[in-house]
Amino acid sequence: MQSSPRLTHPTAVILYAVSRGIRYGFDIIDASGLRSGTVYPVLRRLEDAGLLRSSWERVHTAREEQRPPRRYYQLTGSGAETVKQALQRYPGLGHTLGRRSAGQPTSA
């Protein structure tokens, strides 16, 4: 486990998105407007730091939906504490995910 990454605004947005139930990379990109070149490296750093953990969905599920398997992320206890810090540091964080809410399907 590495030390905690800097709490930049994109890092805070990604942690907040995961805390709101937006759990895989493309959904985070869609909800936040951040680019994939930002989101995926930050997700990796957050997992390496122990703020997130991930698991792959079953290949069978992805095949049924004719798409690649998704890697789902969830907060750890440390990640939840970091989200609290992020909300204090970036008071408008709750408005950064646009109108998309957790659980809505990504439009094709």
Image: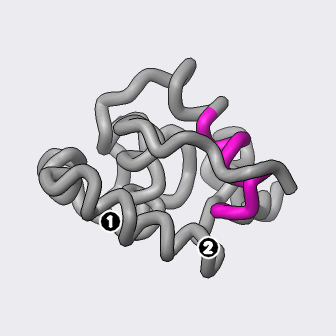
Q: Nearer the viewer, residue 63 or 35?
A: 35
Q: Amino acid at mark 1?
A: Ala
Disc 1 element: loop
- Label 1 crowd (10 A; few <14 / some 14-19 / many >=20): some
Quarter occupied by residue 54: bottom right
- Magenta segment, which residues? 42-52
Residue that appears at 24% across and 61% down? 101
Quarter occupied by residue 42: top right
Q: Nearer the viewer, residue 106 or 80?
A: 80
In the rendered structure, the answer to whether residue 77 lies left or right of residue 82 reads right
User: Could you tell me residue 50's position as x and y percent?
Assistant: 74, 62
In the rendered structure, the answer to whether residue 86 lies left or right of residue 35 reads left
User: Could you tell me residue 3's position as x and y percent?
Assistant: 75, 51
By secondary structure, the bulk of the magenta-drawn segment is best described as helix
| Residue 17: mark | none
Residue 60 shows in this picture: no
Residue that appears at 16% across and 46% down? 98
Write down the residue under mark 1. Answer: 102
In the rendered structure, the answer to whether residue 96 lies left or right of residue 17 reads left
Residue 42 shows in this picture: yes
Quarter occupied by residue 55: bottom right
Write down the residue under mark 2. Answer: 78
Gap between marks 2 and 1, in whole Å? 21 Å
Magenta stretch contains residue 73: no
